[in-house]
Image: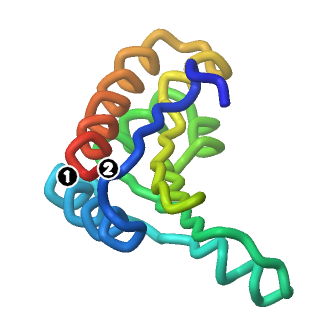
Amino acid sequence: MNKDITYVKTSSKSFDDTIAALEKNVADNMFRVLHTHNVTNTLAEKDFTINPLKIMEVCNAGFAYKALNVDKLVALFMPCKYVIAENDGAVTVTLFLPPVISEFIQKDELKELSKDVEDKLKHILDISV
């Protein structure tokens, strides 16, 4: 995947322990887990088998409020997401970088705000793996 739009880390923890660390650190850093999609289980319901994969949707209401007041179309990119995947025993966490939003919605106010969100989400990821 393009390194300019994602931030990827390999975890030293198990899949479940990585999820638990993310959940704790998201909350400890003023974000909230809105929902975690268990893609593996969803696909298994239709008899498709894939390695463990979850999508964790997170949000900080203050950041969301500011961004939506700049342009409501920011909602197309919300909430922020971590993708947690296990392949061959290795657990990776991928974050879609918020500054990419300002490439699609070109408003100066979004550039600084999205960079602040990126810094916080990267920090959460760094301390979780």
For the residues labelled 1 and 2, the Cα–Cα distance comes to: 6 Å
Can you say whether 88 is above or below 123 in the image?
A: below
Q: For label 1, count other residues whose C-alpha is less than 10 Å away and answer few (under 14), some (14-19) or many (20+).
A: few
Decide if residue 58 is on the left or right side of residue 128: right
Q: For label 2, count other residues whose C-alpha is less than 10 Å away and answer few (under 14), some (14-19) or many (20+).
A: some
Q: What type is the residue that disc 2 sits on?
A: Asn
Q: Residue furthest front?
A: 88
**Residue indicated by mark 2:** 60
Residue 23 coordinates in the image, percent (x, y) = 29, 65
Decide if residue 79 is on the left or right side of residue 20: right
Residue at 58% across / 70% down in the picture?
52
Residue at 65% across / 43% down in the picture?
76
Q: What type is the residue that disc 1 sits on?
A: Met
Does the CB distance between marks 1 and 2 fall below 8 Å?
yes
Residue at 17% across / 50% down in the picture?
29
Q: Quadrant of residue 28?
A: bottom left
Residue 118 coordinates in the image, percent (x, y) = 37, 30
Disc marking residue 30? 1
- Name the one closer to the observer, 46 or 16: 16
Quarter the N terminus occupies: top right
Determine the secondary structure under disc 2.
loop
Decide if residue 41 is on the left or right side of residue 49: left
Q: Quadrant of residue 75?
A: top right
Residue 97 coordinates in the image, percent (x, y) = 49, 31
